[in-house]
Amino acid sequence: DYNALLYSVTGGDKDNVIPSRSEAVIATESLEEFTETVSDLRAAFAQEYKDTDSGLKMEVIPCDVDDNPMNYESRDKIIAAPNTIPNGVQKMSPDIEDLPETSLNLGVMATGDSEVRLIYLVRSNVDAAKDELKAKVESIAGEIGAGFSFNGDYPGWAYRKDSKLRDIMFQAFVDMYGREPVVQAIHAGVECGMFAQAIDDFDAVSIGPDMQDIHTPGERLYVESTKRVWEYLLEVLARL
């Protein structure tokens, strides 16, 4: 509805979390027609995301609003921003199969007194690729008349094909559990990149207990797995 008025948009709490919900406060000439439109969108999205987000919900809740909506120009910029700025995996690793190399996600959208802030987390294990993506986002923001700022950083942490530490940890795992561990590179921001940036020839392996649904309200950790990781770490330290 081109004549719909927008008051606010909110969603997400942390930039490193894929938001689980969002909402927009909108004024429209016909609540009935708007509800039907949302119903059609809900059906279309449910079909599109049935395999990845089967619990998708969309609902219209009537509410009271003040007399200070955004003007149409601001509304259109806010709609254009998340539709224009890239989101998700941007490049896969050329060296490791099925591993994302560079990505970003919209983690937070918040409406203030005079602005709407969109907070993205940009990540890559290749610093040059990350800088290129940041420049692209800044350029798009400028084209739609939005401001841009960059805060914080997770330095890239490239996978080492030759790692003495990983070899020691691999053998310790085999000796303790009678099977080979799964060794893989992951696409995530971790503190190892900060150490690698500051220490020449830094060798590191990231390990942890069994966890599920990380960075979601359903995140959980298995206590028995935590105990095993502690015992494993002590054995690794003894072999260094």
Image: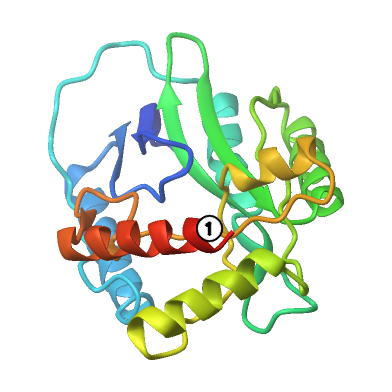
Label 1 packing within 10 angstroms: few (<14), some (14-19), many (20+): few
Q: Quadrant of residue 63?
A: top left
99 relative to 233 in the view: left or right: right
Percent position (x, y) of residue 66? 25, 12
Q: Residue at x 41, y 35 (%)?
A: 14
Q: Quadrant of residue 82?
A: top right
Tally of marks: 1
Q: Residue at x 73, y 27 (%)?
A: 145
Up/down of 44 relative to 177, above or below: above
Percent position (x, y) of residue 120? 57, 40
Q: Which residue lies under the disc numbered 1?
A: 206
Up/down of 142 relative to 133, above or below: above
Whether residue 80 is visible, yes or no, is no
Q: Nearer the viewer, residue 10 or 173?
A: 173
41 relative to 98 in the view: left or right: left
Q: The C terminus lies in which quarter of the figure? A: bottom right
Q: Residue at x 38, y 77 (%)?
A: 48
**Residue projecting furthest to the front:** 238
